[in-house]
Amino acid sequence: MKLTDLSTIREIMTRHGVEFQKKFGQNFLISPAVPQKIADAAVESDSNTDQLRGILEIGPGIGTLTRELAERADKVIALEIDSSLIPILSETLADCPNVKVINQDVMKTDLAALCADEFISQGYSVSVAANLPYYITTPILMKLVESKLPLNTITVMIQKEVAARLCAPAGNSEYGAITASLSYYGKVERLFNVPAGCFLPAPKVDSTVIRIRLYDTPPVSVESEACLFRTIRGAFAQRRKTLANSLMTEFTQLGREAVQNAIVSAGLEPSVRGERLTLDDFARLADILYKCEIENN
Ligand code: SAM
């Protein structure tokens, strides 16, 4: 069964009385090379371990990428929110005994428990692969990294503009709070672009596949992770303002003078803007602000 064929997709969906659900960000792949390349990237990046290779897929749709993952990995767990797709997946993945589909919303799933039960306790490594629904890309990525799962890599197709933001270096206009926050958890690489015509229905935007290699230990060490993320959030809260003014949104109680002093103590120019700060800069600044807050209390 060739799941990237337009006629096959339409036939299966019609037979099961299923329609594309815009609210779930359903744009299915119709270019055979793309799911193959995503699966290659996701599984290859996991192959430097002696363990069995486990893949957690988010949003299998009708199973196009899932089948490619199943060919390369030892076990695939696929979380699909749309219950109407489950009978289709039973059919399209009937010959893939190493795939288990779970009808669940990834945002409501206890991913740590899932990874422990399905992968780690059974001797599998675990990486994520997905053609992510656009409407919820950033929340899913943040949930994956913030849950501190034992993941090796996250290989996902996302909107091209979002990928540009996630891969931007400090100082670039695309660099923002999400870029800096994500760089605490892993190294993001841009793999390849995918034009809108490779999907059914075609979205209005092009896509990019990125891969995040998660760090075992963060590249900076801080007194308080919560304060680091507040510092990052505060620095980008008002992008047109200077760092001190923007940080005041998160550190109001400290007062402007203390915030300005913290910036100087961190070795930064008082007039600097948040987008120029590297993760190292944020870590230094966050530790000083954290100390100020403790002394203030
Ligand atoms: N993997 C398929 C492919 O590449 O052709 C489908 C990708 S489609 C862009 C996104 C998929 O994610 C859809 O099947 C959609 O129903 C599913 N989805 C959307 N929100 C979800 C959520 N919160 N949890 C799990 N799956 C979700």
Image (tube, rainbow, N blue to C red):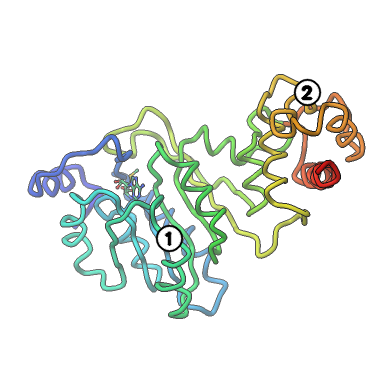
Q: Earlier in the sequence, mark 1 or mark 2?
A: 1
Q: Nearer the viewer, residue 156 or 117?
A: 117
Residue 279 location in percent, x, y? Answer: 75, 45
State the quadrant of the N terminus.
bottom left
Which label is found at residue 242? 2
- Residue at 40%, 72% in the rendered image: 118
**Label for residue 110?**
1
Q: How many marks?
A: 2
Q: Amino acid at mark 1?
A: Asp
- Determine the residue positioned at 43% across, 60% down: 110
Residue 124 vs 41, above or below: the answer is: below
Residue 210: x, y in percent? Answer: 52, 47
- Amino acid at pointer 2: Thr
Q: Is residue 201 left or right of residue 232?
A: left
Residue at (31, 72) in percent of width and height: 98
* Residue in front for this viewpoint, 203 or 245: 245
